[in-house]
Amino acid sequence: AEKARQEQAAKEAAAKRAQEEARRKAEAEKRKAAEAAEKARKEQAAKEAAAKKAQEEAKQKAAKEAAAKKAAEEAEKKKAEEQRKQNEREGGR
């Protein structure tokens, strides 16, 4: 009877150890999955931030180019106007 009790105790201890091991493994897997998800989320956020930055830079560049073009057109108009006045003055002699 004593031997049977010891065997039962050993079986229970082994079962408990196996259960504990399985639980630890499951927790480690869960943690790994959570870390992977967090890493993926961070990478996605970084990608989105980079895309947003690129978009902003493109917008600013376009705005600068538009401003430069407008300034050039204004200068061209002014020059043409000056030329016209000059011609009128010279023609008016």
Image (cartoon, grey):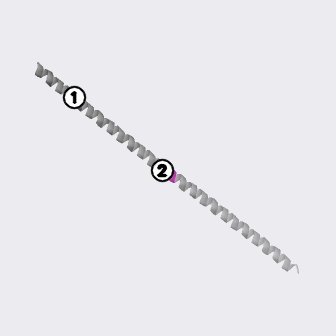
Between 10 and 41, the one lying in front of the other is 10
Q: Is residue 23 magenta?
A: no
- Look at mark 2 in the image and give the residue it sits on: 46
Q: Quadrant of residue 19?
A: top left
In the image, is 22 to the left or to the right of 43?
left
Where 84 sits versus 18, above or below? Answer: below
- Number of the label disc, if any, that sits on residue 15: 1
**Kind of residue indicated by mark 1:** Ala
Which stretch appears magenta? Answer: 45-50
| Residues at circles 2 and 1 in contact by the CB criterion of under 8 Å | no
Residue at 55%, 55% (x, y): give it: 55
Please identify, in this view, whether the residue under mark 2 or under mark 1 is nearer the observer.
1
Q: Is residue 29 left or right of residue 75?
A: left
Question: Is 15 displayed left or right of 68 in the figure?
Answer: left
Q: In this rendering, is residue 24 above or below 1?
A: below
User: Based on the displayed image, in which of its 4 quarters is residue 11 positioned?
Assistant: top left
Q: Position of residue 75 (x, y in %)?
A: 73, 69
